[in-house]
Image (spheres, rainbow, N blue to C red):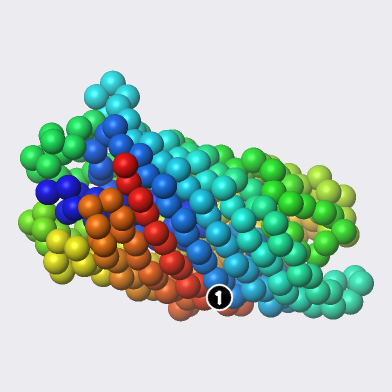
C-alpha cells in the first residue's frame, strides 16, 4: 500500500505555479525532500509576481524543499521550507535609460508555509492512512516570503524582490475511484499580499495590489505507479504603483498545462510538467517546463 500512498505526494517548489498533487492528504510522522527545476520564458519578473509588459525574460529555478507532516490536535498538518537558487536573463525595453539587459544568478527569496486540515483531513499514521477512505478535503494554508534573495536596485532584473509577501489559501481535494487507480480534482484559491519595495530600480517606492490566483488540477492514476494530469491556473490583479503612478500592469491571464508522474521506488518518485499562458487580457506571455524529484522517509 505504501507505494500507492507515496505516489500521491508532490511538494511545494515555489510560491507561483507549484504544480499538481501538492495538497493531497498524506500520513503524518513522515518527511520529504524534493528538488524542482524550472525553465521559464515570460515577460514577468523572476518570482512571476510582477508583469513587465516591455520585457523578454528567461529564468531558471532550482527549488530545494523540506516537508514535515505532523499532528495538530488530531488534524493533519504540514510544514515546508523552500530555498530558491536560480538565474534570470533578459531585456527590459523602454526604460528612462533606454533598453536595458541583465544576466544575474544567485539566491531568490525563500518560502515558508503551514497547512492545516479543516475538513476530511485527520492526522493518520501510515498504517491507519492505508485503511482510510478519503473523501472531500479542505485545508487552510498560510505562507510567507521574506526579502532575503539577491537584490540590487541598480539592476533592472533581480532574483530577490526586496519586499515581504504573504499568502493565504484554501486548497481543496476531491478524490474519485479506487486507491490504486484514483482520480483527484484539486481546487486551490489563493490571495497574495505584498509589502512595499522601498528601493526599486529607478524610483523611490513601489507598491503592489493583491494578486488572486485560482489553481486547479485533474490527475488520474493509470497504474499504482503511473499518473498523468491536466492543469489550469487563473491569475488576476497584482498591479504595481511606482512613486504614486500606476504602472498599468495588472495581471489577467489563464494558463494551462499537462503533467506526467511515476513512482520509481518505495521512497523515490518524480514528475515532469509543461504549461503556458493560453488566454490573456494583459499582453502577458510565458511558458514553463518543470522537473521534480521527491524522496520520502
Q: Residues within 10 Å of mark 1 (few under 14, many from 20)?
A: some
Left or right: where does residue 153 sit relative to residue 190?
A: right
Point out the residue furthest to the right here: 97
Q: Position of residue 36 (x, y in %)?
A: 47, 59
Q: Residue at x 56, y 40 (%)?
A: 144
Tell me the quarter of the image containing the C terminus. top left
Q: Position of residue 229 (x, y in %)?
A: 28, 69
Point out the residue furthest to the top here: 73
Q: Residue at x 84, y 74 (%)?
A: 100
Left or right: where does residue 168 sit relative to residue 166?
A: left
Q: How many marks?
A: 1
Left or right: where does residue 39 sit relative to residue 271?
A: right
Closer to us: 158 or 241: 158
Residue 270 falls in which quadrant of the image? bottom left
Q: Residue at x 35, y 73 (%)?
A: 258
Left or right: where does residue 28 sit relative to residue 66?
A: left
Q: Residue at x 37, y 44 (%)?
A: 32
Q: Position of residue 31 (x, y in %)?
A: 35, 39
Q: Position of residue 149 (x, y in %)?
A: 69, 49
| Residue that carries the numbered disc 1 in the rendered image | 286
Residue 220 visible in the current orientation: no
Residue 294 visible in the current orientation: yes
What element does badge 1 sit on? strand
Point out the residue furthest to the front here: 265
Amino acid at each position: 500500500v505504501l507505494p500507492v500512498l507515496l505516489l500521491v505526494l508532490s511538494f511545494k517548489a515555489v510560491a507561483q505555479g507549484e504544480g499538481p498533487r501538492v495538497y493531497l492528504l498524506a500520513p503524518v510522522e513522515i518527511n520529504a525532500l524534493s528538488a524542482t527545476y524550472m525553465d521559464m520564458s515570460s515577460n514577468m519578473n523572476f518570482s512571476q509576481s510582477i508583469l513587465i509588459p516591455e520585457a523578454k525574460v528567461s529564468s531558471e529555478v532550482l527549488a530545494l524543499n523540506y516537508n514535515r507532516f505532523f499532528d495538530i490536535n488530531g488534524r493533519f498538518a504540514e510544514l515546508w521550507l523552500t530555498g530558491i537558487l536560480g538565474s534570470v536573463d533578459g531585456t527590459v525595453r523602454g526604460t528612462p535609460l533606454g533598453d536595458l539587459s541583465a544576466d544575474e544568478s544567485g539566491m531568490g527569496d525563500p518560502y515558508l508555509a503551514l497547512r492545516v486540515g479543516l475538513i476530511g483531513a485527520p492526522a493518520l499514521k501510515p498504517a491507519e492512512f492505508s485503511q482510510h477512505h478519503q473523501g472531500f478535503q479542505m485545508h487552510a494554508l498560510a505562507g510567507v516570503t521574506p526579502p532575503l534573495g539577491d537584490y540590487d536596485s541598480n539592476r533592472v532584473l533581480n532574483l530577490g524582490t526586496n519586499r515581504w509577501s504573504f499568502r493565504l489559501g484554501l486548497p481543496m481535494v476531491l478524490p474519485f475511484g479506487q486507491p490504486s487507480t484514483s482520480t483527484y480534482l484539486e481546487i486551490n484559491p489563493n490571495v497574495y499580499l505584498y509589502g512595499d519595495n522601498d528601493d526599486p530600480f529607478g524610483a523611490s517606492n513601489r507598491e503592489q495590489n493583491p494578486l488572486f490566483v485560482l489553481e486547479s488540477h485533474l490527475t488520474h492514476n493509470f497504474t499504482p505507479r503511473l499518473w498523468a494530469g491536466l492543469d489550469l491556473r487563473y491569475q488576476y490583479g497584482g498591479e504595481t504603483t511606482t512613486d504614486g503612478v500606476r504602472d498599468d500592469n495588472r495581471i489577467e491571464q489563464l494558463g494551462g498545462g499537462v503533467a506526467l508522474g511515476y513512482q520509481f521506488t518505495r521512497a523515490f518518485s518524480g514528475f515532469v510538467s509543461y504549461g503556458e499562458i493560453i488566454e490573456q487580457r494583459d499582453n502577458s506571455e510565458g511558458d514553463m517546463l518543470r522537473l521534480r524529484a521527491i524522496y520520502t522517509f
